[in-house]
Amino acid sequence: MTIAACALLTLAVAIYVFWLHDDGDAGEVKTRLAYLKERKDVVYENLRDLNFEYKAGKLPERDYASLRDSMEQEAAAILAEIEKLELQHQLGRA
Amino acid sequence: MAQLGSFALLLALALSGYAFFAGGLALWRAAVPAPAGPGYDPQIDLTRRRDGGAAAAQGPDRLRETARRAGIAIWLTVTVAVIALLVAAFTNDFSVAYVAHHSNITLPAAYKFAALWSGQEGSLLFWSWLLATYGLVLRLRYKTDRRLFAYAGVILAGVQFFFQLLLVFAAPPFALIAGTPPADGNGLNPLLQYPEMVIHPPMLYLGYVGFAVPFAFALGALIMRYPGEKWIHITRRWTMVTWLFLTCGIFLGMHWAYAVLGWGGYWGWDPVENASVMPWLTGTAFLHSVMMQEKRGMLKVWNVWLIFCTFMLSIFGTTLTRGGLVSSVHAFAQSSIGDWFLGAAGWSGEPWKSVPYYVPGFLTIVFAACLYFFIRNRDHLKSENRLESLVSRESSFLFNNLLLLAACFVILWGTLFPILSEWVQGTKVTVGPPFFNRVELPIAMALLLLTAMGPLLAWRKTSVESMKRNFGLPAIAAAVTMAAMVAAGVRPWVDAGSFYALMTVGLGVLVAATVVMEFVRGGRVLAAHNGVNLAAGMLQLTRRNTRRYGGYVVHIGVALVVVGMAGLAFNQDKEQEMGYGDKLAIGRYTLVCRSYTQGQSEMVAGTTDPNYDYEAAIVDVFRNGKLVTTMYPEQRFYHSSRQPQHMVAIRSTPREDLYIIYAGQNPDTGRPIIKARVNPLVMWVWVGLLVMALGTAVALVPSVAAAKLARAAKPAPVRGRLAQQPATAATASLAAASQTGEAGD
């Protein structure tokens, strides 16, 4: 009985592990562009939070303006690099 | 059953070895670039690999898929082993040594189940099963990011392989008793026969084991040089759930110590308690500092090492509990398996021709692997931004991290001091609670202050004007509370206990006030914008950013816990021999001994358990001359283990706990001894835990904004249009403003 149970367990495991129906998709390789797009979302979210905190009265006007400028510069740099990479990609395809 | 269990563990060992080595080989083969000869186009090669069109690329992918499936199959085989051990326990199969040592025929069913993690072999099996379960969930969710999950799966398989090796060679749970099996088992340690012990170890283990998942992702992301912080996003929930389990495990352990050990406290700085709190401290630091990485791309090196250390401290905790490294009241199953974790050093051969040797243990190998990949890929962890000001949200996280690590280091130092002192001086010097309290209390105060300040500081930099605006009201609330305490008789200049109690309550109020202000301010904005009342506005606010506001609720829970702990300074205790009708006055209470009783199964508290005999006191409790309640402190004597055990009677109110212990009879006079304590504010420690759990649960719920984004799948048209424009600061501002409006709802 025990031997039969052990044999059954081994067989079930072997079939499950080695009987593949597909080639096992490797998945996408994450590119710098994909990363920058994620980064862009984060910076936008930071800007959104900043605006909300300003509306909530947590930040004086001067602080808000200074922080917003700094975040916008960061967002602009990311957008510029995204643009550049997308352009390179389009040129590469052409 | 024992044979089936043993076989299942062997199979699990083979599967975990396969998942680790074959998976590792597949990832290595896939990572090796094709030779870049003339006409080689890496883009085409990438596409070919992605499509699985070339035979060369199919090999690693198929191998990797078999490794993933082997990882899933580990769960099945370890589950079979767990079931086999439980069946052996429930059928009183005392031919299995583990069952004979940790169970007996009359043991209640819940404790037979708990016997699974009450001894060394069983608890390692349980560890392995939890790891296999976490691995199962991870491998089933692999489509989120196949490559990253493949790396994490291989690393988890490596950890699993180590535990399977332990279970097969060092601590086999299905070892058989030599000779004739006994008619009955030794039974469970009486200290463990308490309802919370059925859930405390699993919670703690879920916490310890769970940190393997973010560790695997962090190490995997480092090895594959994963671009960006998405691995943090993927592991965020894993880490929070793990942290919650560990928190609950620690607090359940505290409550067990409070209710069972009978010394009146809940934290004794025992090495095993310390072992559980160390990964909690570094895990808490990680949960905070990853926000800096997500939001600002900073502290990448710090974060990977924090999670590496958290995982290693979790393993170290298991080593302390199971390896017999230091003596502890909690180390229920000590043995020499410590060498498997830490390695074995010594001298080979005869003394005159001896050579020092060191066989690395699991922790050493993990540390070496982390260090190797860190050195190899450290350029990948370069920060994208720098700290702009010392007064900013970032710096508050940084200081919070430094304090948490300082607290962790002090605990590690104090815990290992007996070993270190023995190495250096040759004598074992133990460090006790006064050392820990003296160092940890100021750190805890500073941490509380940062907990209060953090949410009110802006990212990047905070001006003096902003600080004045945000700190005014909370500071006034804290000052008024402290003044009220002094007026009520707390004298901080008289003793350190009163000073710390005053500071703790003051800072606790500061934390709560800052959190309330955050909710009210944000709630007002949304209430005005959406035309709802303040309560609805605050609810919308929480749903809009569950992670942040759930985190704030956790902070309130922490404040409640520390306020509860502040009560320690005002504990009272008395001990007295009490005959029938004798009185004992303590605090606001007068205890009158009504009677004593003893028996086997018909308990005064209404439970039945033939597993032990008991003696109990029946004590009437009066306040201002009025009967408040009757309490039944008892002492049990367990048949199988022949050990006594206190069962403390506790009457808990928000103001204080009345805590009564029946300490047996004075051997000289034959009179029963009653110990009584009044412990103020203890209930708030447990309420704080519930609030922390609630906050974490809120933080685990997806935010409305995130859910909306996930549903939208595609970027909004306005954003798409803006993305086409030249990238300037103005464009970014417009794009962000468009999103601000969206999120302001």
Image (cartoon, coloured by chain):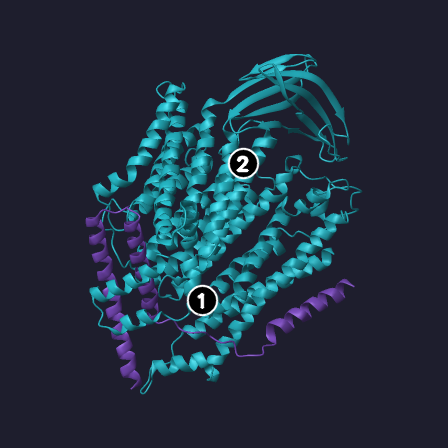
**Residue corresponding to mark 2:** B254
Quarter of the C terminus of chain B within the rendering: bottom left
Chain to which the residue tagged by mark 2 belongs: B
Chain ID at mark 1:
B
Q: What residue sits 41% from the left and 54% below the top?
A: B544
Q: In the rendering, which numbered label is found on residue B476?
A: none
Is B426 placed above or below B727 here? above
Answer whether residue B297 is visible to the viewer in this image.
Answer: no
Residue shown at 21% from the left, 49% from the top? A61
Q: Quadrant of residue B32?
A: bottom left
Please say if B558 is above or below B228: above
Chain A shade in the render: purple
Rendered-image quadrant of the N terminus of chain B: bottom right
Q: Answer left or right for B214 relative to B450.
A: right
Residue occupied by mark 1: B711
Q: Amino acid at mark 2?
A: Met
Query: Toward the viewer: A14 or B208?
Result: B208
Q: Which chain is cyan?
A: B
Label 2: element kind: helix
Query: Which callout, 2 or 1, points at the residue further toward the start of the chain?
Result: 2
